Image: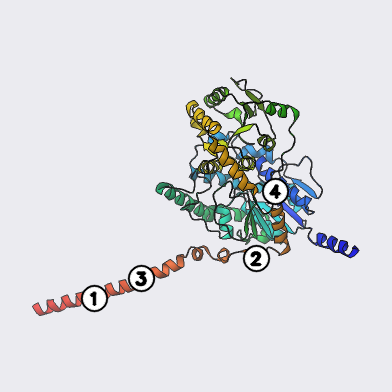
Amino acid sequence: MKFALIFLCAVSWVECYKILVVFSAASPSHFMLCNALGRGLAKAGHEVTVLSPFRDKNPPKNYREVVLTGFVENKEKVMPLNFFELENMHPWLSIYSMMSVSNTVNETFEHPNFKKLLNEKFDLIIMEQFVFESLKALSCHFNVPLIMFSIVGANLWSNIDTANPSPPSYIPDLGLSYSSKMNLWERTFNSLTVLINIFNNYLYYYPTQRKFVQKYLPKCANYDFNNVSFYLMNSHESTSEPVPMVPNMINIGGFHINPPKELPKDLKEYLDNAKDGVIYFSMGSNIQFSKVKPEIRDTLTKTLGKLKQKVLWKCDEDTLHGKPDNVKLGKWFPQSDILAHPNVKLFITHGGLLSTFETIYHGVPVLTLPVFGDQKLNAARMETLGYGIKLTFSAITEPDLTEALNKLLNDPKYRENAKMRSKLFHDRPIKPMDEMIYWVEYIARYNGAPHLQVAGKHLPWYQYLLLDVVLLVVLIVTIPIVLLYIICKKLCCSGNEKKKQKKE
């Protein structure tokens, strides 16, 4: 018995790793994922150091924070205060917008708290994939495997890193509002968008990020940005359409969701006493209703005020002009716990991925009002999968909103589809948090697990795209044709010359 205990202790000691988690974006929703990931690994017994602009109010044991102070305060310098201005931005212009954000990575490199980290030692790095490619070079600096966390599932960046196939014929670009069923024009525009993104990456983004590495981590100046051991994907087939994934990519979408807790007394009473049900309305952590155009706000308040259901509305203002009696405002609500309540009939959302997972976790249909980023793509998926309806926020009208609400509240197919999606979400052989912990330990245990990486990852881009093969085939076909043409031309010319000589 004593020997068994000693053996177990030895195994647990061997499995304890020093892990650096890097989420440098000053976004509350990003930190929610970072925090859930770090806490999960810390509770599993690992020493976790989290580098981010935020703090955990009640960090667990083994969870250390290195805070990028000032990042949240400086966020408005690189991101607009009014996210509604991004709604109608052309997808190709949004690429430029993201690149402007990527160039702020120097703030991380120059932060004194970051510099102190460079003198420490770690066994593994987990980093969010978010336009800060140069930070990947920390893997070289610490000489440890790198796990990337994709906050939006498979995308151009993760697919390049892993040589994961992503045909534009049925996989829309992240910035578009298409589903997998695209018509000819959509497939054409999607293909062009993917090409523009690829050219932007190789001609501008990677070279620019390379300069940051050369400046701040000169020993890793030649670091290969594609040198990623593994990808944790914040996605799942229950909330999105299935896509190809190579062996070193794994879906853990919804890992951040905890079982519902008891609601605060006032909220519980509000929800319990809603005999006709409740609509929960939240546009996420970044979007502020104080920036909404008055006419859009009036449309929302008038339409919602006509409903018999109560409306629980997350809003950054203490009051709204023309607020109906059936609306209760709040600057913060425990969203997942509210969606778990049986009286919640509908979720009105911006379509953020975390909200998408939480509504599917609890099987609640959605009305999406997407604004920017991946929200339009998520909204299109919800509508395609039959558990939601999407409306254009800036063009919303009272008749359209009324029609959408009536369908979602009265047509049982939307709730039935949401419940089916919820069933698919929960029907897994292992909980997503446990799966995440297993694979993180696996990658640390096998020093990056190179045996999981497909050979295409190590091919030059022209070989991966078979451009050299295409060139060879073109040469094989054209050279004989050209030679034949030259021979025929010479024969014809010589024949003509002989005829001329005879005439003379």
Viewer-side residue, 458 vs 220: 458
Q: Amino acid at mark 1?
A: Lys
- Circle nearer the N terminus (4, 3): 4
Q: Position of residue 277 (x, y in %)?
A: 62, 28
Which one is closest to the eye, mark 1 or mark 2? Answer: 2
Q: Which disc is residue 490 wearing?
A: 1
Which one is closest to the eye, mark 2 or mark 3? Answer: 2
**What is the spatial separation of the Cα atoms under label 4 and label 2, in whole angstroms?**
32 Å
User: Which residue is disc 4 drawn over?
Assistant: 110
The kind of secondary structure element at disc 3 is helix
Whether residues under marks 1 and 3 lie with C-beta atoms below 8 angstroms apart, the answer is no
The kind of secondary structure element at disc 4 is helix
- Circle nearer the N terminus (4, 2): 4
**What is the spatial separation of the Cα atoms under label 4 and label 1, in whole angstroms?**
70 Å
Viewer-side residue, 34 vs 442: 442
**What is the spatial separation of the Cα atoms under label 1 and label 3, in whole angstroms?**
21 Å
**What is the spatial separation of the Cα atoms under label 2 and label 3, in whole angstroms?**
39 Å
**What is the spatial separation of the Cα atoms under label 1 and label 2, in whole angstroms?**
58 Å
Q: Is residue 16 left or right of residue 221?
A: right
Residue 225 seen from this side: yes
Q: Residues within 10 Å of mark 3 (few under 14, many from 20)?
A: few
Q: Which disc is residue 450 wearing?
A: 2
- Circle nearer the N terminus (2, 3): 2
- Circle nearer the N terminus (1, 2): 2
Which one is closest to the eye, mark 4 or mark 1? Answer: 1
Q: Residues within 10 Å of mark 2 (few under 14, many from 20)?
A: some
Question: Could you tell me which quadrant the N terminus lies in?
Answer: bottom right
